[in-house]
Amino acid sequence: MARRSRIGEESLVPVYHPAGFDVPLRTALQEMEAARWAAIRDLLDATGSDWGLRTSRSQVLAAAAARASHDIVGAWLDEEPDCTDAHVMRARVLVQRALDAHHRGQPRARALVEAARTSCYQAHVYAPADPVPLVAWLALGVTDVRFLYREFWLPRTDPMQPPETSDPMLPPGPWGLWSAIWERHPYNREAAHQLLRCASRPGTGAPPMVLARWVTSWADPGMGAALLMLPLYAAVETFRQYGESSPLLRRQWADYPVRRDVLKAADGADLRADPHVSVSDLNYLAHALFSAGEYTRAADVFEVLGCHFTRAPWAYNTLDPSQDALAAHEFLRVRSICLSPARTVRARDTAPPGPAPP
């Protein structure tokens, strides 16, 4: 845990690692660098049916495997063709490759999406009780910009009710996949984020903040901490897109209704350095609490985070969001204010988040 800053104390160096607080995952990633697929198998086997941890671990492992110079999951399948976890990871990796190709505008993206959809279905057949193949499938929704796949563009239905129940407030979206995931693992963090990306992708007309608040309305006390973070992500995305042309957005976190979202997320937050807790969520929460003027509560989050840092949301408070060093500097600046014994006085004199106006 990070200590409170004192004069003469060694400066904290922000560190980003995709494993976050998950030490076993960090070890598996190191083994993957040496092309040892057994590390993936052993970690997923040890994770068992802890669906939240299985989802986050498989996502990080797949991102690393998809960008590796060797086909580590393919080698695993060659050795253990009937291994369920290997088929699930193959789907994960193919989805990640399809997403990478889509974001880069590569001509082969469409073919990769088709292959990934097929692999997700096959993994679902292998492991029907596992939400991960369905979460991976849902992640492909952001690529369907032409609305070609019905599973990402179903009519308005409420996933908490029978499919025939219509909800006129919901835009068409991936409600069938979302419902199937919810049945297997309610409050799945990645699924909620993928739903938000899919249902608010270009052409849908669905405001991300409206969808985020709709999803958080399902969060029962003590159960949906990760879902409560969604409006914080939506607020940062709004600022990223429109902050330069709408200077007042720099104060949105301190005003209703975003301030209400921030306090609700803080009240339900899981403030532990634990593999089940997202480092990204805690970075967004610390940023939002500071921006809302809740410096003491932000300090509590920074204490848990220690050196764990994510580029977003801090990068969007700088003049050049592409510079990781500027994002790290902003993280340290805000952390120093919040952890200082004189934080109330110092923060009061500090400009609200966002790059200084010209």
Image (cartoon, rainbow, N blue to C red):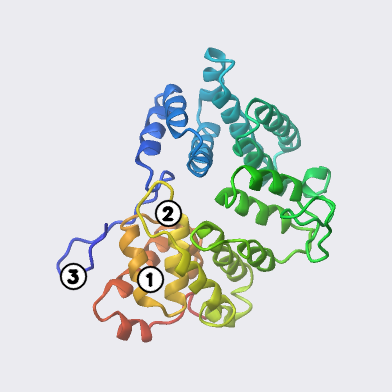
| The N terminus: image quadrant | bottom left
Q: Quadrant of residue 345?
A: bottom left
Q: Earlier in the sequence, mark 3 or mark 2?
A: 3
Q: Image height check: is 251 above or below 106?
A: below
Q: Is residue 167 left or right of residue 289?
A: right
Q: Amino acid at mark 1?
A: Ala
Q: Is residue 232 left or right of residue 28?
A: right
Q: Amino acid at mark 2?
A: Val
Q: Nearer the viewer, residue 105 or 236?
A: 236
Q: Earlier in the sequence, mark 3 or mark 1?
A: 3
Q: Position of residue 130 (x, y in %)?
A: 60, 35
Q: Nearer the viewer, residue 49 or 110?
A: 49
| Distance of label 1 from label 2 (alpha carbons) | 14 Å
| Marker disc for residue 6 | 3
Q: Image height check: is 80 above or below 169?
A: above
Q: Nearer the viewer, mark 3 or mark 2?
A: 2
Residue 323 visible in the snapshot? no
Q: Residues within 10 Å of mark 3 (few under 14, many from 20)?
A: few
Q: Residue at x 75, y 58 (%)?
A: 202
Q: Position of residue 104 (x, y in %)?
A: 65, 44
Label 1, secondary structure: give it. Answer: helix
| Distance of label 3 from label 1 (alpha carbons) | 18 Å
Label 2, secondary structure: give it. Answer: helix
Judging by the rendered image, the residue that carries numbered circle 2 is 279
Label 3, secondary structure: give it. Answer: loop
Q: Nearer the viewer, residue 191 or 205?
A: 191
Residue 344 visible in the snapshot? yes
Judging by the rendered image, the residue that carries numbered circle 1 is 298
Q: Quadrant of residue 180?
A: top right
Q: Are marks 1 and 2 in contact (CB under 8 Å)?
A: no
